[in-house]
Amino acid sequence: MVTAVGNARRAWHIAEQVPDPELPMLTLADLGVLRGVEVGADGTVVARLTPTYSGCPAMAEMRADVAARLRGAGYTRVEIRTVLDPPWTSDWITAEGRRKLTEHGIAPPGAAPRRAAGPVPLVLTPTRRTVPCPRCGATDTEETSRFSATSCKALHRCRACREPFEYVKEI
Amino acid sequence: MSDDHVYLSLAEGHEDDTRWAYGTGFEDPLHGVDTTVPEGVDAASLAADCVALADDALVSAQRLAEWTTRAPELEEEVALANIGLDLLGQARLLYARAGQVDGTGRGEDAYAYFRGADDFRNVRLAELPGGDFAFSVVRLLVLSSWRLAHFEELSSHPDPVLAAVAAKGVKELTYHRQYAAEWVVRLGDGTEESHRRTRRAMERIAPYFGELFTAYDVRDEVVAVLRQVTEAAGLPMPVYRPLPGTGRAGEHTEHLAPLLAELQSVARAHPGATW
């Protein structure tokens, strides 16, 4: 007999393996967008997902993919809920996710900026953020474009090994 | 289930196996969110607020998208498209929320594609035609500063959905404003020509300030940001010259209708189409 807790854990393990469409080396769990998976008394699986950015074009596909995997694993009743609060930040990327990003040549984000009380300050003086090169580890790197192929990444270049690399931005 | 290739697995679960890209399906962006309107919140005014904020974002996103294939540098094109995508995402969430609470049950498409210019409630600054790059970044600076200040307040709104959309938007608008502010400083403090164009852009948008500050009481915060940027850029603060009327009441310039005609053409020619 499967216990309720064991069942929920099994459902979580199935859902967490779904890869992110834009960063396929990460699972939805690594990225921190899978907020929870519960199995109700009637066997309904409820999986909760949160978008990374408001305009994330892949939310519908993530939902379909999680639902398809759960159904494929024998859960007939599957419900996917969108969770908006608390909003996703890059801090939700797990340690495992950061390791995988580096392994694939993408620099993981630093700590997300904290919002203090009062208006969000605008800083016009150049801020230097050290982004170590994911290939050679050198800290002598420069930003070449703050925006790139997906909302979450910037483009950088390593001055030591001369390689360009992507970098997941803090948000 | 195709585990081998992520894009193959994405195509599963869709009947149309000829899909060439993901993200093109129309789906409720608030799928599975608790739709209850809390007690004490007036549903009609909540819906109207959501539509106005969504219209600002949709119209701005359309103007930003016009730079695609035409921006001065590839990096700037990608930046403007990314910012437009964030705003489009905010618009989708807000339209979906409006449809839940206004009693019509309409989806996002009904608001975006099947309303005329008179029904749009965006501020007129958002709809003004593109002009040059200086105009676009000056407008983006003003609109993102204004929206950011208002979203900061809305993140404690009694409606949890609007509050959550705003809280998420604050993070995005912060880097939109950062991008725009850095460009305004660079252009204002750049060559004689870039300074002249940036100054001209400031003068062009000045008549539309009053409308922004009538809509939301965030004037001090926005003026402080503009003062900080114009000082760093060596530009004069724009002179406030009020213009009668407001987009919030459906009073628009002649530029909104052509923008909507282009935005809505496919959806209106093929109602109910998916691709």
Image (cartoon, rainbow, N blue to C red):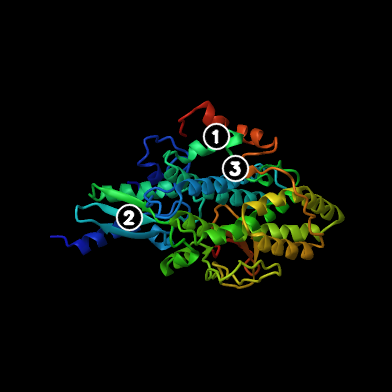
Amino acid identity at mark 3: Arg
User: How far separated are the C-alphas under marks 2 and 3?
Assistant: 36 Å
Residue B231 x %, y %: 78, 65
Q: Which residue is mark 2?
A: A47
Instruction: Inspect this view and state whether residue B73 appears.
Output: no
Q: Quadrant of residue A47?
A: bottom left
Instruction: Name the chain letter of the residue that bears numbered label 1.
Output: B
Residue B176 x %, y %: 63, 57
Residue B270 to residue B218: above or below: above
- The local secondary structure at tag 2 comes to strand
Confirm whether circles 2 and 1 share one chain: no
User: How far separated are the C-alphas under marks 3 and 1?
Assistant: 11 Å
Instruction: Name the chain letter of the residue that bears numbered label 3.
Output: B
Q: Nearer the viewer, residue A143 or B167?
A: B167
Residue B184 x %, y %: 74, 57
> Foreground mark, 2 or 1?
1
In the rendered view, does A57 fall on the left or right side of A138?
Answer: left
Amino acid identity at mark 2: Ala
Q: Nearer the viewer, residue A14 or B156?
A: B156
Q: Residue at x 61, y 32 (%)?
A: B261
Tally of numbered discs: 3
Q: Quadrant of residue A51?
A: bottom left
Whichever of labels 3 and 1 marks the residue nearer the N terminus, that label is 1
Q: Dot 1, how many residues are within 10 Å of its Cα: few (below 14), some (14-19), or many (20+)?
A: few
Mark 2 in CB contact with mark 1 (< 8 angstroms)? no
Q: Nearer the viewer, residue B125 or A151?
A: B125
Amino acid identity at mark 1: Arg
- The local secondary structure at tag 3 comes to loop
Q: Most extreme residue toward the top, as rendered? A: B269
Q: Which residue is mark 3?
A: B121
Q: Which residue is mark 1?
A: B115
